[in-house]
Image: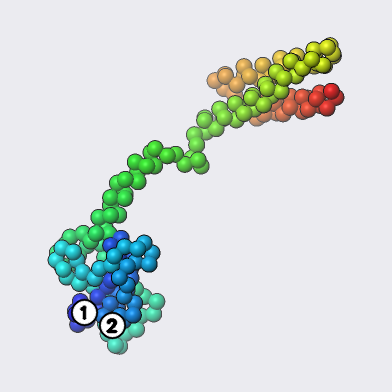
């Protein structure tokens, strides 16, 4: 039996996905289960059993590409439909999960600066330490002096990173110069 003489009945899945708003006049669109989520479907309020209002039935009016919006509250008893309750429960639980998992695209700028410093220092410091331990460098006074000089410059940069005000552009240029000097020295070896 249609919703009323003027309206057909709407079919909705229990998660709130629209199935059809022509349940009685176009039975070919009925579904026992939702094709989006697999949930069972309904045509009535679980509380008062009134059918959900579907499309307006008027032979003089034609709506193309129109579908009736899925209601969240029954207009007869005023109770929430099951999909509204589920959506509200999801809203409550989502903020908790957002607090525990931070998006990788929203990282604190101070944390980014620290990571940049750590990556730069780890790479250069590792190379300098390896070069100073290299037996061929220890035997060659000229190369050993060059590595010690670069190491001294590197320690100056390292100390400047821990000051309250740091010029990161200048730090970047100095770090690049040490990188270039290291590469040039390594190529000479």
Q: Quadrant of residue 136?
A: top right
Q: Is residue 97 left or right of residue 42?
A: right
- Which image quarter is the N terminus in? bottom left
Q: Position of residue 162 (x, y in %)?
A: 57, 19
Against 94, residue 79 (above or below) is below
Q: Position of residue 188 (x, y in %)?
A: 85, 24
Against 160, residue 16 (above or below) is below
Residue for point 30% across, 70% down: 32
Q: Which mark is residue 25?
A: 2
Q: Position of residue 28 (x, y in %)?
A: 34, 80
Q: Quadrant of residue 157?
A: top right
Residue annotated with mark 1: 2
Closer to the camera in the image, 43 or 75: 43
Against 188, residue 40 (above or below) is below
Contact between marks 2 and 1 (CB within 8 A): the answer is yes
Residue for point 23% across, 79% down: 7
Say which element carries label 2: loop
Residue for point 73% across, 27% down: 179
Residue for point 34% across, 77% down: 29
Q: Residues within 10 Å of mark 1 (few under 14, many from 20)?
A: some
């Amino acid at each position: 039996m249609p919703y009323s003489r003027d309206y057909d009945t709407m079919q909705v899945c229990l998660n709130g996905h629209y199935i059809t708003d022509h349940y009685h006049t176009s039975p070919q669109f009925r579904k026992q289960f939702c094709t989006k989520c697999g949930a069972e479907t309904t045509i009535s309020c679980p509380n008062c059993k009134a059918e959900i209002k579907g499309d307006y039935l008027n032979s003089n009016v034609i709506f193309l590409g129109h579908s009736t919006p899925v209601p969240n509250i029954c207009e007869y008893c005023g109770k929430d439909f099951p999909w509204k309750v589920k959506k509200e429960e999801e809203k409550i639980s989502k903020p908790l999960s957002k607090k525990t998992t931070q998006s990788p695209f929203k990282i604190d700028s101070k944390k980014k600066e620290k990571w940049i410093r750590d990556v730069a220092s780890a790479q250069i410091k590792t190379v300098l330490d390896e070069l100073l331990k290299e037996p061929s460098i220890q035997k060659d006074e000229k190369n050993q002096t060059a590595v010690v000089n670069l190491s001294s410059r590197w320690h100056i940069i390292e100390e400047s990173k821990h000051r309250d005000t740091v010029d990161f552009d200048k730090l970047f240029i100095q770090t690049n110069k040490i990188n270039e000097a290291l590469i040039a020295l390594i190529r000479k070896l």
